């Protein structure tokens, strides 16, 4: 699979962010070079029997960026346009995210190039099981713990857990997180990323002297993350003015009813021809008048071309890598705060960590305990990032990256270079 050479590829963005922060904190060159590189990249062939009897071979990957602070952790993405670049950027970002919020894991990411919507349930199960088998040598409870990401869900995690357990010889719930609750999943995990985003929105709007009532919110991408944010904010009295899926979105400045939106999305698979709202493109959603913009789809959505047109007062990154470094600069100059992905959407990996802790101990917590611990960690991390950004007069992303990279670098330095 070729690496993309575009300047705005997610991997270039991730490297630029690391390089910038390395300069600010005067990172030793050895450590900087180690962090620019991957500890392991595995490419696997995933042959499966299709329903029509033919065999098809898919390409799968598992990228392990850094394990200085603990076992690798990161999602599994199924997407027809998945690239090595995307996965490298996402894996590196996991290293920073875990570090920033104090979760004792390193960063990884994996995936299969496929269009899961074009596969039957049986084909999807065989693909998942064969992919899991192929990456088995490098995953494990103490080694690398996969989780859901775009186009993967708790059913896929259940198949991964079962495949690993069958080959391992005993039931191994802690091998993945984001599993169904009845096989060792954590209460609160499904909503964790979205709930975490709403906690962070709460912190950000408090600072901007706004409140939830009548807050106008636009959400790009209405999948697991986006629709959970939409539901929770709608229940709190916010106005969800726009939402979208890969096929475009809808806008109504008076607000949209989350329940009606979800019913329509489930029945039609998109928001096309949704009544009582104007159809909009994914690009125009980013430029709508609103208080809070939540990009919750894919990376590289806010770029130098459209950053000048963003009208939101605050951007909360639900997706991983939705803002390019050039766009960041424009938004900083325009004084539009961007709550960076490694802080805003860290709820998912935090509760994944809680799930892993519960699995390892075989001792499970109630949802209130999970959510209280989640809020504590996110509030603390938000406070640390805000404090450093004010002290160093840098934007929130730079402050978050300084904190995250420094902790990983300290771990590398104290462990030393083997042998
Ligand atoms: P999902 O597959 O459940 O939903 C993705 C949504 O984005 C869908 O509504 C889809 O139609 C839409 N979409 C796809 N391509 C699009 C495009 N080009 N333009 C606009 N919309 C598009 O995925 P998810 O789990 O909700 O993840 C969304 C984002 O959040 C990803 O960037 C993911 O890496 C990130 N994230 C997810 C979690 C998690 O716990 N699921 C945690 C942290 C970060």
Image: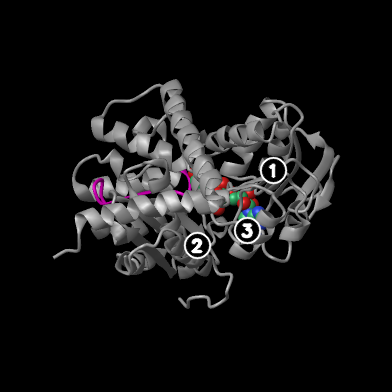
Quickly name the residue at label 2. 17
Q: Is residue 351 above or below residue 15?
A: above
Q: Residues within 10 Å of mark 2 (few under 14, many from 20)?
A: some
State the SS at label 1.
Answer: helix
| Residue 358 percent location from the top left of the image | 31, 31
In space, the residues marked 1 and 2 are separated at their CA atoms by: 36 Å
Q: Earlier in the sequence, mark 2 or mark 3?
A: 2
Residue at left offset 42%, top offset 41%: 101
State the SS at label 3.
Answer: helix
Q: Are marks 1 and 3 in contact (CB under 8 Å)?
A: no
Q: Could you say which is closer to the camera, residue 232 or residue 18?
A: 18
Number of the label disc, if any, that sits on residue 328: 3
Q: Which quadrant is home to the N terminus?
A: bottom left
Q: Nearer the viewer, mark 1 or mark 2?
A: 2
Quickly name the residue at label 1. 265
In space, the residues marked 1 and 3 are separated at their CA atoms by: 32 Å
Q: Is residue 144 left or right of residue 259?
A: left
Residue at left offset 41%, top offset 63%: 49
Q: Is residue 271 magenta?
A: no
Q: Nearer the viewer, mark 1 or mark 3?
A: 3
Identify the magenta region.
139-153
Q: Which quadrant is home to the C terminus?
A: bottom left
Residue 125 can be seen, yes or no: no
State the SS at label 2.
Answer: helix
């Amino acid at each position: 699979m070729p690496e993309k050479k575009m300047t705005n590829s997610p991997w270039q963005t991730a490297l630029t962010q690391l390089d910038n922060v390395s300069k600010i904190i005067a990172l030793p060159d050895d450590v900087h070079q180690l962090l620019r590189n991957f500890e392991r990249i595995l490419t696997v062939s995933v042959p499966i029997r299709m329903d029509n009897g033919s065999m098809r071979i898919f390409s799968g990957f598992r990228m392990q960026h850094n394990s200085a602070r603990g076992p690798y952790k990161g999602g599994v993405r199924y997407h027809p346009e998945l690239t090595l670049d995307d996965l490298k950027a996402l894996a590196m970002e996991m290293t920073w995210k875990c570090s920033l919020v104090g979760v004792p894991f390193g960063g990884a990411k994996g995936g299969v190039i496929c269009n899961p919507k074009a596969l039957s349930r049986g084909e999807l199960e065989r693909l998942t099981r064969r992919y899991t088998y192929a990456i088995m040598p490098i995953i494990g409870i103490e080694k690398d713990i996969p989780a859901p990401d775009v186009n993967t869900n708790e059913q896929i995690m259940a198949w991964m857990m079962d495949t690993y357990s069958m080959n391992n010889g005993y039931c191994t719930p802690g091998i993945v997180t984001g599993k169904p609750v009845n096989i060792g999943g954590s209460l609160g995990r499904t909503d964790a990323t979205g709930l975490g985003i709403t906690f962070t929105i709460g912190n950000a709007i408090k600072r901007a002297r706004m409140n939830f009532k009548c807050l106008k919110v636009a959400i790009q991408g209405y999948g697991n993350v986006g629709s959970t944010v939409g539901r929770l904010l709608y229940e709190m009295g916010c106005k969800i003015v726009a939402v979208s899926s890969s096929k475009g979105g809808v806008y109504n400045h008076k607000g949209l009813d989350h329940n009606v939106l979800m019913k329509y999305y489930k029945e039609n698979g998109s928001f096309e021809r949704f009544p009582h709202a104007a159809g909009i493109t994914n690009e125009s959603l980013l430029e709508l008048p609103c208080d809070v913009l939540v990009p919750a789809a894919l990376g590289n959505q806010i770029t130098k071309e459209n950053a000048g047109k963003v009208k939101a007062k605050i951007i909360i990154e639900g997706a991983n890598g939705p803002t390019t470094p050039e766009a960041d600069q424009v938004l900083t100059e325009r004084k539009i705060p961007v709550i960076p992905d490694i802080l805003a959407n860290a709820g998912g990996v935090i509760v994944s960590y809680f799930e892993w802790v519960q699995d390892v101990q075989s001792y499970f917590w109630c949802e209130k305990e999970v959510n209280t611990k989640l809020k504590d960690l996110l509030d603390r991390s938000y406070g640390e990032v805000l404090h450093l950004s004010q002290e160093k007069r840098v934007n929130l992303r730079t402050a978050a990256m300084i904190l995250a990279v420094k902790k990983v670098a300290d771990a590398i330095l104290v462990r030393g270079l083997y042998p």
